[in-house]
Amino acid sequence: VIENSRYRKTAHYNVTHRRRQNFYAMKSRHWQMLSKPPFNILSTLESVDDAIDANGDIADQILKNGLPGFALAESPQSPDRDWRGTASAEDMGKARTTIKQFYRDWSAEGAAERRACNEPVLQDVHQLNADVVDKGKIKILVPGAGLGRLVFELCKSGYTVEGNEISYHQLVASSWVLNHCQRAEQYTLFPFALDFNNVISRSHQLRSMKIPDVHPATELEVASVSTPTHAFQRMSMTASDFVSHYGGEECREMFDVVASVFFIDTAPNVIRYMEVVHNCLKPGGVWINVGPLLWHFSDRAPKDNTEVTDRRDRGDGEGVDEPGSVELTVQEVLLLVELMGFEITKHELREGEAGYIQNPESLLLNTYRLSHWIAKKKCEN
């Protein structure tokens, strides 16, 4: 929430103000040449400023709707409740990424990226529950739910779905788009306006799109016709660390399906994720996974042994705060899944490549091959 309040000011300074300074630092005959047609660099920077303001309107709305959830006022009267100006550079980077992620999750133009990872999950869930009349009785957990699109799609299909997300940037943004947008295509997003590298055309950099591509409330209202339980009662979100929240006895055997997309590689130690999935799945329940293995903690520095021992003795530091990390291959992950009490019933390396918040017109295209598998929790004898 705090970072969203500074998105506009910080982006103007870091993206366009500094570029103007560097531009005018060139030899005068050079910057004057580039100021004129067909280059119009200064006009381009003005257009980028306009795009930043449009994205800033989205950030402002997320801020406005997110503050009450933290019992914060827009204009705090008490100094100890003044949240303004406290965001770090890392926080600002997360805020920019969250705004940009609306392209992937909630624009028509991002449908190809969503289709590559969400469609296999939706197909698997439908096939596994084809004979179930009341889909609302099937409880699905989506860890690492992000901006909530997969949660929304599964709920729209009739299932009872719980998303889990640790990032407050993602949580307040998903709450805004799911609960507070008034209509489809209400806001204009410029997802790539801040990207100046590997650009073929300024039209690609300054391409705009409308979000959300659908109005969630309307879609869920329509999907609830003739269903025993309204969609609004079948969709929820938890704000917590996955391991800490779902690893205990209170969540034991709660879910029929766990659907993880671009998630398992966020674990320092993926064994902990496997233990937690096993804990919260019902016997015979299934774990559907789609994603790469870009291990997020692969460059983590080792912790001091004394600190590790102290934290273990205290029993804290669960989840992403746990010490240690390991990076496994796809084959090793599958072997470990079976060792942890599951039966692999399907595995494939998906054909084609999947982007992640990728400008399809860029000179640099970072894409993934996705590992897709289904694991069934073995019933205890």
Image (cartoon, grey):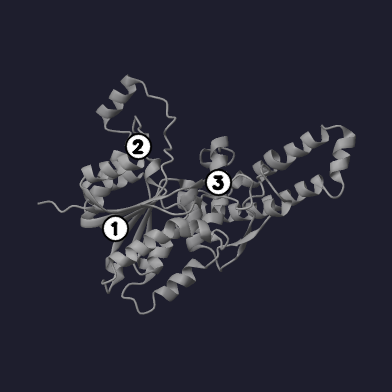
Judge the density around disc 1: few (<14), some (14-19), many (≥20) Cα neighbours within 10 Å.
many
In the figure, is residue 102 to the left or right of 242? right
Cα separation, mark 2 vs mark 1, equals 24 Å
The image's mark for residue 257 is 1
Label 2, secondary structure: give it: loop
Q: Residue at x 34, y 62 (%)?
A: 124
Q: Nearer the viewer, residue 316 or 42?
A: 42
Q: Secondary structure at mark 3?
A: helix
Query: Of circles 2 and 1, which is in front?
Result: 2
Give the residue type at disc 3. Thr
Q: In x, y percent, where is residue 105?
A: 51, 57
Measured as percent of width and height from the top left, residue 268 is found at: 36, 36
The answer to which of marks 2 and 1 sits earlier in the sequence is 1
Q: Kindly identify the residue that appears in the image at 34 percent across and 30 percent down.
A: 323
Left or right, residue 284 beside residue 99: left
Identify the residue under disc 3.
97
Quote the CA–CA distance across marks 1 and 3.
Answer: 29 Å
Q: Is residue 68 above or below residue 35?
A: below
Residue 342 in percent (x, y) is at: 22, 49
- Of marks 1 and 3, which one's residue comes earlier in the chain? 3
Residue 302 point in image, percent of width and height = 38, 24
How far is mark 3 from mark 2, CA to CA?
A: 27 Å
Residue 157 visible in the displayed image: yes
According to the picture, the residue beneath numbered tag 2 turns out to be 328
| Residue at point 66%, 55% (across, down) | 54
Foreground residue, 42 or 341? 341
Relative horizontal placement of residue 331, taking residue 282 as reference (left or right)? right
Pointer 2 local density, CA inside 10 Å: few below 14, some 14–19, many at least 20: some
Q: Mark 1 or mark 3, which is nearer to you?
A: 1
**Residue type beneath disc 2:** Leu
Q: Residues within 10 Å of mark 3 (few under 14, many from 20)?
A: some
